[in-house]
Image (cartoon, coloured by chain):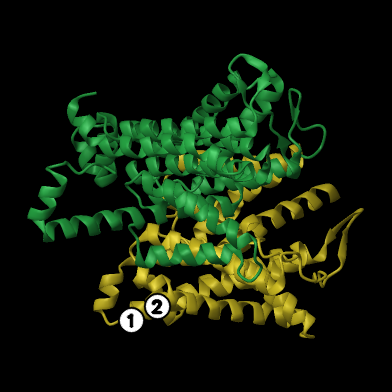
Chain colours: A yellow, B green
Amino acid sequence: MDLVAAIGLQLAYVIANLALISLGLAIIFGMMRVINLAHGEFLMLGGYTVVVATNAGVNIWVAMLILAPLVVGIIGVIVERLLIRWLYGRMVDTLLATWGLSLLLVGLVTSIFGASTATTVAPPLGAIQIGTYSASGYELFLILITIVLLILVWLTLRFTKLGLLARGTMQNAEMASALGVSTSKIYMITFGLGAAVSGLAGGLLAPMTGVLPTIGATYIAKAFITVISGGSAILAGTTAGSILLGGLNGIFSFIVGSTFGEIALLLAAIILLRLMPRGITGRFFRKSL
Amino acid sequence: MNSGMLRQMRPTFFYALLGVIFMFAAPSVLQLFTIINLTTAIALAVLALSLALIWGYGGILCFGQVAFFGLGAYVYTISAINFGGSTWAILMSVLVTSAFAAALGYFIFYGRVSDVYLGVITLTVTLIFFSLIRRTSGPEYKIGNALLGGFNGVSSPPINLPWNPTSFLFPEQVFYVAMAALILCYVFVGWLVNTKFGRVCVAIRENELRAELLGYDTRLYKLGIFTIGAGIAAIGGVLFCNGVGRITPDVFNLYNAALTIIWVIVGGRGTLIGPIGATFALFYLTAALGGQSVLNNNLVLGVILIIFVLLVPKGVAPTIIDWVNARRKKAPTRARRRRGSRAEGSQ
């Protein structure tokens, strides 16, 4: 029984981890049809924000939950104004430009902080006991915060004025604009919010993984595969993609080792896209958010 | 090959001839160190050529061309170690890589995965290779006699004369092989894009729906050009691990994947000589940047990529061609007298 609980927790963590790193990308992709290749670097910047802030004496919770999303969100707005807004509707060019941005950010951070790991932050919560097994309390916290984050995004989209305008713009940007919605402003806010969520995720993961200028590359493949498999619905897509791929990854990692867990994730995603080219939410839960 | 096609390919032959002259002149002019470096650059140029074919002519935005390049290099190295000679290893490398590309392409094209998704999937495949091979450092990870070596990679046996494993080539001889391979691949691709197959691929790039309504199975054509491109990338990979002497998982990293895209963007989509030229130019630019520590390589490449996407989206070679054509139109009589009524080639 304890073993089942421990494995269940581990599985939940793999899924939550996937959802956490994908959510920011999914928001930007779902709303604006922009695939942000600098997503990994937004996560990386969130991590660096936490490390720099805690080294400067800021409380780690403040650094993770407030500073990281704030800083990266502002960077996101600046990027949208300077770079992305010239390229709306040109999907391939946006992809290439954000790739350029990704290299630029890696280069910039390497020049400032050096190529190796900056001082790491210790996970702020200790271990917890499940019978004879011990699990990391911080992992449990990450699972909870991912659920809270998903609910918050859902509430924002469903019940606020901003959410209504954003959903309208998502459905038909021209019509929304004809009805007096400043779509350009909506895009700017969405991109900023997506970046902020990425920054939050990067900050939260920093104690688990440490930070490196090139750490974005380790997240980016998984995040993309999750979002693309999930399809264009922001929440349902991310959740369905994470549960399916994260579940497979976790199960295969447990049975045959973590290397094969990642192969299983990739193969599942490729076969899934052969069957459902528009992702899970392109076929099921179409009306969902 | 009819006379029309020969006329179309005239610029291709011109550049190929320049390449041949360079191939025989370079070793007597340049130092051995430069020649060895040049071999690596040539291998990368073959990679750029393969992407120029499938992206520039096939319209397939493949972000993971380095996956085929690296896979080709790994298959060559592992089979050369196991077979004890390079002849079958080269063949094996091209075949296995093409087969892998065909299998991947089947899922992509027959699933009708569109441009941007395609880019992301191929990039993901590349990154999975990267993280996978990095973890193979233990003695249990081996194929035949070849240890995969994880992060440190495998050292590659040099190319030998066909069916004569003891007479392997020296670095300056590998240069000849590499240059000859580049020229042959270039002429082959230049020919391919002028065949009916190549023209249908260009038609699909321009308007997939219309090509399909005309009765072409666009999925099959895309799969074909994708597989051929992967085979050429594998040849580049074989040359690369010969030039460097070993192959490490780093070929699969994000930086190299981006670099390949940058060569083709800077050189220009829809040309072949542009990306090849851009490869050499950026190879020496990054080499020069490596010697100083103020500007980071990533930073410079990122800026180059952003500038080209925003300001020169066509790339250098097509911009020059457009400029020349515009000038020719301005002074039609003079130009006609000078250049004859030569048809505009693809180059």
Q: Please report the residue visible at 42 percent of the width from the left and 49 percent of the height from the top.
A: B277
Q: Position of residue A170 (x, y in %)?
A: 37, 68
Q: Is residue B192 left or right of residue A15?
A: left
**A94 up-or-down from B190: above or below:** below
| Label 2 to label 1: alpha-carbon separation | 6 Å
The chain that hosts pointer 2 is A
Residue projecting furthest to the front: B28
Kind of element beneath mark 2: helix
Q: Is residue A105 left or right of residue B180?
A: right
The disc placed on residue A182 is: 1
Q: Please report the residue visible at 25 percent of the width from the left and 46 percent of the height from the top.
A: B206
The chain that hosts pointer 1 is A
Dot 1, crowdedness within 10 Å: few (<14), some or many (≥20)? Answer: some
The disc placed on residue B167 is: none
Q: Please report the residue visible at 67 percent of the width from the left and 19 percent of the height from the top.
A: B167
Do the CB atoms of the residues marked 2 and 1 lie less than 8 Å apart? yes
The quadrant holding residue A124 is bottom right
Q: Please report the residue visible at 40 percent of the width from the left and 78 percent of the height from the top.
A: A186
Kind of element beneath mark 1: loop
**B120 up-or-down from A24: above or below:** above
Q: Position of residue A198 (x, y in %)?
A: 59, 69
Dot 2 corresponds to which residue?
Answer: A186
Position of the N terminus of chain B by quadrant: top left
**B316 up-or-down from B249: above or below:** below
Of residues A137 and B336, the one nearer the viewer is B336
Q: Position of residue A6 (x, y in %)?
A: 81, 52
Residue type at mark 1: give it: Ser
> Is residue B72 at least partly visible in the picture?
no
Q: Is residue B166 left or right of residue B26?
A: right
Residue type at mark 2: give it: Ile
